[in-house]
Amino acid sequence: MKKYYFIFFIIFISTISCKKDQKISNTSEIDRTKIVKPLPPLDYEKYMRNVPKTDSLCNGEIEIAKNDLLKYDGVYVHTICFGCDFKPYEEEIKEVLKRKKFKLGIQDLGCVIYDGQTQGCYRAYIDLKMKAKYGENYRSEIENEAINILIKNISINNKIISIYDLEPNEKPKILNPKIVIESDYYTTIKTDLPINRKSMHHLFTDINFIVEKDGTISNLKETNWVNEKGIDKKYKQDIINLTLSTLRKDYNNWKPGTYKGNKARVENTLRVSFE
């Protein structure tokens, strides 16, 4: 789950700055004072045929793409941007690429668009040349190989997969009819501890755990504690202990999660409030 906290942190930082430095040569002449609104989607395939010399950002990315294609048998590009998807088989993709002697290329897209400058040309050029060499479906073929390896790792090697990588119908579901979990993430438990009730309105904790293939839960741990109203610290451990024991007792029966029809060990997180 730490990987996903890191991902969420990167996305959060992106929403604040919404601007990334481009590691492309020959971009010194870009006038960074001319910021314009995003244009309609660009036909990259057509644009690659006649990139203006003034588009130094695009031309710089194309040069990097050409060099990568000279050094490797092929390149598979992973795009990083705010809102871009992360695949659950990223590690398996690397395994496939290593076997094929392909490079994992990175296309880093920022949120700011500059007048006359085009992002995304690295991937566009790679895509154009890879399709010509390996066919229109080269990306899906690589990804399907990676998915098959992931399924093997899940089924045979008990690899843990995050709940955030599953489709809604694949996610584990609590089977205890008395338990309410809102939006697959929020739940509330009762406590008889001597806590100021006004403080409890701003009190919650996040608990990370694994839903095993048999529907039981394991590896419970507190990952976040929020206490805006300043509840007495001497009760914190009591609350955490109560939370863990309640989850082990009442939240220990789930319909197991699946990935493409295969039962999987699923890493999950619940945000627990109190009443």
Image (spheres, rainbow, N blue to C red):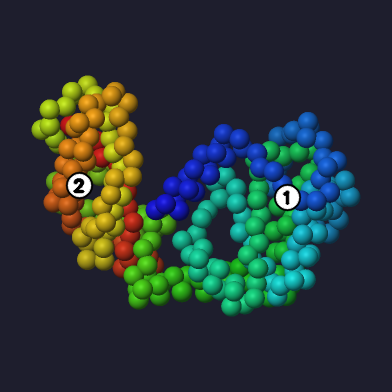
Q: Height in image: 237 above or below 202? A: below
Residue at the image position 14 percent from the left and 35 percent from the top: 191
- Dot 2 or dot 1, earlier in sequence: 1
Left or right side of 174 for 160: right
Determine crowd level at label 1: few under 14, some 14-19, many 20+ residues with C-alpha closer than 10 A: few
Report which quarter residue 20 is drawn in. top right
> Where residue 143 sits in the image (x, y, percent)?
54, 69
Residue at the image position 18 percent from the left and 43 percent from the top: 241
The residue lying furthest to the front in this view is 234
Report which quarter residue 192 is drawn in. top left
Quadrant (top left, top right, bottom left, bottom right) of the C terminus: top left
- Viewer can see residue 204: yes
- Secondary structure beneath dot 1 equals loop
Q: Name the mark on residue 47.
A: none
The residue lying furthest to the left in this view is 192
Residue, disc 2:
244
Determine crowd level at label 2: few under 14, some 14-19, many 20+ residues with C-alpha closer than 10 A: some
Left or right side of 227 for 176: left
Left or right side of 112 for 214: left
Q: Mark 2 near mark 1, Cβ–Cβ under 8 Å?
A: no
> Where residue 210 sits in the image (x, y, percent)?
29, 57
Q: Height in image: 40 above or below 51? A: above
- Secondary structure beneath dot 2 equals helix
Callout 2 amino acid: Leu
> Where residue 271 sits in the image (x, y, percent)?
30, 41
Callout 1 amino acid: Lys
> Where residue 39 sits in the image (x, y, percent)?
72, 41
Q: Name the mark on residue 23.
A: 1
| Near-viewer residue (33 or 36) | 33
Q: Real-space Cα distance between discs 2 and 1?
A: 47 Å
- Viewer can see residue 177: no
Residue at the image position 59 percent from the left and 74 percent from the top: 98
